[in-house]
Image: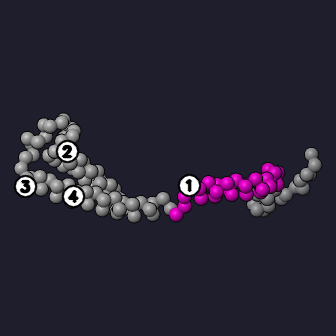
Amino acid sequence: MLYDILMLAQVIIAAFLVIVILLQRSDGGMGSLGGEGGGAVMSGQSVGDVMTRVTTWLGVAFMGVCLVLATQSSGRGGESSVIDAMQAEKAVEEKAAMTPSVPAEVTDVIGDMLEGAEVAPVNPVE
């Protein structure tokens, strides 16, 4: 639940961060995705200072949520890595290959013995 809320907050913060960065006044270069047109929308030094502060705080919030999400997700995947999982799978396969298979006749006899039925001798050579 907390992880989902933090993930939603991360997406919202990222969207606002992109919007605030694109609204800032540029001093040259590409500008606000359109070249020189963004300067008329956000003019004045005080507005620029506010936008810089908002960008800074959104960036700090974004990084903070990233760190919290990283610590929250570290316990979600368990303590093993992909290599550990591959080694464990290989060990299970090797153990299965080394374990002798039991014929169906023997398991039937054992099942009958556990149920208390009369067991007829099994001829192993057929």
Q: Amino acid at mark 3?
A: Ser
Which badge, 4 or 1, comes first in the chain's sequence? 4
- Which disc, if any, is residue 46? 3
Quadrant of the rendered image containing residue 28: top left
State which mark lies toward you, 1 or 3: 3
- Identify the residue under disc 1: 82
Query: Split into 4 quadrants, where in the image is the N terminus?
Result: bottom left
116 vs 75, nearest the viewer = 75
Colouring scheme applied when the structure was drawn: one colour
State which mark lies toward you, 3 or 2: 3
Q: Residue placed at 81% from the left, 51% from the top?
A: 103
76 vs 105, nearest the viewer = 76
- Identify the residue under disc 4: 56
Q: Amino acid at mark 4?
A: Thr
- Identify the residue under disc 2: 22
Inter-mark Cα distance, 1 to 3: 52 Å
- Write the start and end of the magenta stretch as one range: 79-106
- Above or below: residue 1 compared with residue 22: below
Inter-mark Cα distance, 3 to 2: 17 Å
Does residue 90 appear to the left or right of 119 in the view shown? left
